[in-house]
Image (cartoon, rainbow, N blue to C red):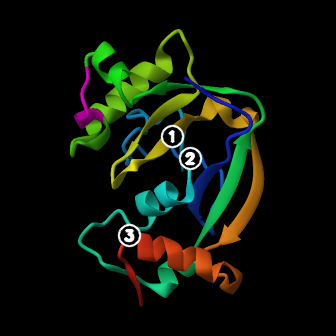
Amino acid sequence: MAISTAVTLWRVYRLSRRPLLFGRAAVHRFDDPAGAYGVLYASEGPRGAFIESVGWDTRRRVVGWGELAMRGFVLFRPRQTLRVFDLDGPELRRVGADARLVAGEDCSISRSWSAALHDHPSRVDGLRYRARHDNQELSLALFDRCRPKLMELERRKLADPKHAAFLADLLDHYGMGLL
């Protein structure tokens, strides 16, 4: 599947780190288990980026202002078309997997698949999948080899008063309160 240069991608990041950080910690769903390559997580819309990074703990119904003050959105776009392996729909079956790959509890399985798809001769730029905490949203796990293909467009601080209505809409959409 292709992600065109017209698509704006969204990512929530910690302000203390680079906005387009390709992590190697092997703690997130599609990280390389050996840490040989980095993965950048993003979504095709602001809701997916928000819920996967801020609202992932389903037991919490509120988010603290301090937590929001440490985070921002970065909007970016591919400079050239990205080729991603689509883990949504019939491709799962074609590779012998099912939805546990993208939503299951055992991330070691997802990390192993990530490594296999990263090392495949087709050399895809990443993976596309349904967000675990809102399966109406589409997310991406981009491999660090696509870094030169990405162009940052805009940064927004989550706690910036000029984005209050935007933040309120996100919180309301997910039934979350603000402390």
Dot 1 or dot 2: first in sequence order is: 2
Residue 103, compared with residue 169, is above or below; it is above
Q: Residues within 10 Å of mark 3 (few under 14, many from 20)?
A: some
The residue that label 3 is drawn on is 174
The residue that label 2 is drawn on is 44
Q: Quadrant of the C terminus?
A: bottom left
Q: Residue at x 37, y 48 (%)?
A: 27
The residue that label 1 is drawn on is 140
Q: Quadrant of the N terminus?
A: top right
* Magenta: main secondary structure: loop
Helix, strand or loop status at disc 3: loop
Marks 3 and 2, how far apart at CA: 17 Å
Amino acid at dot 2: Glu
Question: Which region of the structure is painted magenta?
Answer: 97-101
Q: Residues within 10 Å of mark 2 (few under 14, many from 20)?
A: some
Could you say which quadrant of the image residue 155 lies in? bottom right
Could you say which quadrant of the image residue 134 lies in? bottom left
Q: For this view, does 71 lie left or right of residue 156?
A: left
Helix, strand or loop status at disc 1: strand
Dot 3 or dot 2: first in sequence order is: 2
The answer to the question of whether label 3 and label 1 lie on touching residues, with beta carbons closer than 8 A, is no
Residue 100 within the magenta-colored segment of the rendering = yes
Residue 50 in percent (x, y) is at 49, 63
The answer to the question of whether label 1 and label 2 lie on touching residues, with beta carbons closer than 8 A, is yes
Q: Residues within 10 Å of mark 1 (few under 14, many from 20)?
A: many
Amino acid at dot 1: Leu
Observer-nearest of 176 and 38: 176
Residue 91, compared with residue 22, is above or below; it is above
